[in-house]
Amino acid sequence: MKPRTKQIIRRGLAGFASVILLGIFVLNCPRPRGPLVGTWKGTLDVNRYKLRLLFHVEKSPGGKITAHLVSPDQGSTNIAVDSVFLGLASNAKFGVRSIQGTYRGKLSGHRIVGVWQQRGGRFPLVLEKIDAARFLAEQSAWPPAAPESVAVMQKSGGRLVGEWTGELEDKKPRRLTIKLAEQAGGLTGTLESPDQWPGHIPLTKLSLGKTDFIFDFDTVNGHFIANWDANGNLAGQWDQGGSPHSLVMQRSQ
């Protein structure tokens, strides 16, 4: 091959490599993150569970970007978001180190289409921008009622609606509060246990056994099987992680 031909080929390859490097730079070079400021809502579909995620991104008067994550269906609030990134090609990224979670997606207007990754799992997630009023409402919204709860609502005649409190018979006190509300002809609810975790846990499923009501709180691997006692309380057994305990829950006044 002639020296001039080799020189032309080398220049061509160098130019081609430069184009590739420039493309990589454009895709990953950060741009102003203003379009990400606000609140973004998405719903994860994890097996048969629907889990809402809310990313709230703020910008201080000095221009500093801060963000936190809220997962209302898991009782998680104000989880720090460590990194907020927006590339020139509208590639958005949220990094949440404390729960080993990362979201990557493509921003288009008020919508981000991407994937949530956490502890080896990958889940499609579409985020949509919502206003401040919707953000407040979503944080306190009840989880959707399971279809099985319609039969429970009919059998109980609405008696289960309300707040129920009890204490597990254990070495250390473990208070439990179950809150139930009517929704779409069925029952939705949450579980609180201030001695075990902050916030609330969503009621995954409420169904009928042969003679009992079965409450499932899969987030904490907890299950309560109970029926009415002579005093109108819910009496039965609480099982969490294979450790059963007797439990009587009374209606809160």
Image (tube, rainbow, N blue to C red):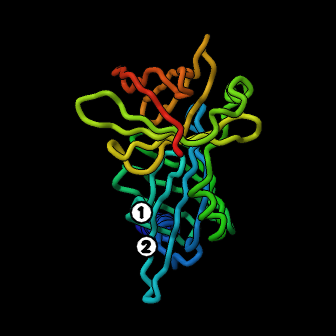
172 above or below 2?
above
> In percent of the image, x 55 and y 74: which residue is there?
37
Tell which residue pokes out farthest to the top in this image. Answer: 210
Three-letter code, disc 2: Thr
Q: Is residue 193 left or right of residue 187?
A: left
Amino acid type indicated by mark 1: Val
Taking the spot 69% from the left edge, 69% from the top edge, the residue there is 109
What residue is drawn where x is 43% and y is 69%?
Answer: 7
Residue 100's spot in the image, x, y percent? Answer: 37, 49
Task: Residue lying at the far front in this picture: please name it.
Answer: 231
Residue drawn at the location 52% of the way across and 79% of the way down: 32
Are dots 1 and 2 in contact, CB under 8 Å?
yes
Q: Splitting the image into 4 quarters, where does residue 88 fall?
A: bottom right
On the rendered structure, is 58 left or right of 197?
right
For label 1, the SS is loop
What element does badge 2 sit on? strand
> Looking at the picture, how far across and down is residue 217, in whole percent?
50, 33
Work out whether residue 51 or residue 19 is closer to the camera in this orientation and state it: 51
Q: CA distance from mark 1 to mark 2?
A: 7 Å
Tell me which label, 1 or 2, sits earlier in the chain.
2
Q: Which residue is mark 1?
A: 81
Query: So how many labels did they put on this image?
Result: 2
**Number of residues whose C-alpha sits closer than 10 Å to that of mark 2, classed few (under 14), some (14–19) or many (20 or more):** some
Q: Which residue is mark 2?
A: 66
**In front of the other: 84 or 222:** 222
Query: Looking at the picture, how far across and down is residue 208, in whole percent?
Result: 63, 19
**Is residue 9 among what the camera can see?**
no
Between 13 and 252, the one lying in front of the other is 252
Q: Where is residue 126 shown, x and y percent of the image?
A: 63, 53
